Image (spheres, rainbow, N blue to C red):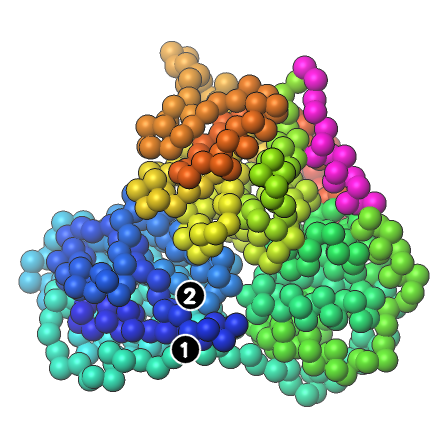
Amino acid sequence: MSQALVKHLAALQVEMHDGSVQPYCAGVFAIFGHGNVAGLGEALWSERAQLPTYRAHNEQAMAHSAIAYGKALFRQRIIAVTSSIGPGATNMVTAAAVAHVNRLPLLLLPGDVFQSRAPDPVLQQVEDFHHGDLSANDAFRPVTRYFDRITDPRQILSALPRAIGILTDPAQCGPVCLALPQDVQTQAFDCPEEFLHPGIIRFRRPPADAHQLQEACAALRKAKRPLLIAGGGVLYSQAWDALRAFAETHGIPVAETQAGKSSLPWNHALNVGAIGVTGATAANALAASADCIIAVGTRLQDFTTGSHTLFAKAQILSLNVNPMDAAKWNSLPLVADARTGLGQLQEALTEWRASADWTASAHTQAGQWNARVGELTAHVPQGVLPYDAEVIGVVRESAQALDQHSDAHDVVICAGGTLPSELHKLWRAGQPGNYHMEYGYSCMGYEIAGGLGVKMARPAQEVIVMIGDGSYMMMNSEIATSVMLGKKMIVVVLDNRGFGCIQRLQLACGIPRFNNLLDDCVPEGGQTPAIDIAMHARSMGAQAVHVANLGELRSAMEAARAAHSTQVIVIDTTHTRTTEDGGTWWEVAVPEVSTLPSVQTAHADYLQGKRAQRL
């Protein structure tokens, strides 16, 4: 059974959006154990020339790398992941949730307990007292789009094509799990020859329904102040040219979500920047006065909508390939592929344009915001620690020493903490996919593993991981994997000695500071840990340095760009300063009853914010 599975994966090819044909599965990340080393491991060894196996250091991290690989290639190709039973498998549950929330392909192949039950209970087997057929792998059910347990080798003939069908479906794309009992992995069966020679995968581009298209066009013809919001679906559909053409033809400003940033070059006259809680001044101001929001390929999550306050009174037209996303918040749905749907709208609306004053205002505000970004990222503080914006500026502009344009050459990767907010506002991406943020699940620990996956997908580009010390401490082992595989990354660690982002949120909710910064977490008899991140990174084979200031950071970045192996640069920063420009309200529930006056004040502010919510 394992041999049939691996041969099928190795033979799968996909027609890319540019017309080329490539292997669909670029390899398998594997950490072997007693649940997969003998069955799937033997099959992978036999097919290693056609389907490479990559050894990782942590199961969750290798799944993050696989997710990032698929995201970096706009969901067109995958790397599969396999683990042993027990903790190896459940380590991947968090990554499955990351892929599920972000609508990204992830093929999970965890080992499972014996189907025969002859040796039960085996090492690492979870025994449920009420369900004899339950194993730890059932934890994947709520965080995958398709789950199957292969209890007979012949079942792989239908289960694997179903899984691939979900991975490549534009509307249902997400993680799939095929749980593989270790005895079934090794069982022989008569496999049809055609299963070992699957056809070429071709992606569908569903068009809009004629009735929905007619309703959408009628709504847009009434709009004077429309705003386009580009979500991740624009990138996954490779609809950036269609987006640009539609915006330019009709004079519509474009704002970008975390997943959709880089859909339009940062310096395009109609790109008004990031939208929402982490958004730019220009984008949020236009969103507040727009009469129609054209949401393209976005889930309309709370950071995009300001917890449904930012454009609470505007008509929302949602162009999305997923019907559930298209219907959110009483939107007028247009269920279609982003590129196809934008083309249909373009063809049907030849005579319509936004108000000339609205378009001119968007041009002005976009230019003002870009100038402000230059000011924020060029500032050099005197006598105080730098904050994220100033570090971003140095990292971004250090490419000039090598005569590179960072907006076109660099891919920046990040996930949790304050950095997603600062990067969403301040990073300048000139090419699609050069901004890689995991902010659907905001999974701390994704960053370094994700950087490895991006480098595997885009080996010619400079991959820059920006990460806080809190996330670094959560998951850093794939630095060693990147060294082992020869996949260079530049990891920039902003060390504010703890969870500075959450301490700010804590204080904003009126709660005294505790349990976030390391200095606040030392009990009697303990001591603040002296963590040397650069030394730690060197112990895993990276070249690493702790810089004292922004000047040293610039020199270190220039050296890192010229190097050929993974680089780690650590700089001390402050969490007490952030970019105040932009942003909007975000709903975080504050206690209704408290003895603290600061919490009572924060609760009153919370109630005030809720009054503006869209119902």
Q: Are marks 1 and 2 in contact (CB under 8 Å)?
A: no
Query: Relative to 545, is 244 on the left or the right?
Result: right
Q: Residue 452 lies in magenta, yes or no?
A: no
In the rendered image, which residue does mark 1 sit on? Answer: 201
Type of amino acid under label 1: Ile
Residue at x 66% of width, y 47% of height: 428
* Residue at the farthest bottom position: 210
Q: Secondary structure at mark 1?
A: loop
* Between discs 1 and 2, the one toward the N terminus: 2
Above or below, 393 relative to 166? above
- Residue 516 locus on image (x, y percent): 52, 28
Query: Relative to 387, is 529 on the left or the right?
Result: left
What is the number of the mark on residue 321?
A: none
Above or below, 482 relative to 327? above
Query: What's the magenta region?
Result: 368-383
Q: Is residue 465 visible?
A: yes
Query: Relative to 31, is 313 on the left or the right?
Result: right
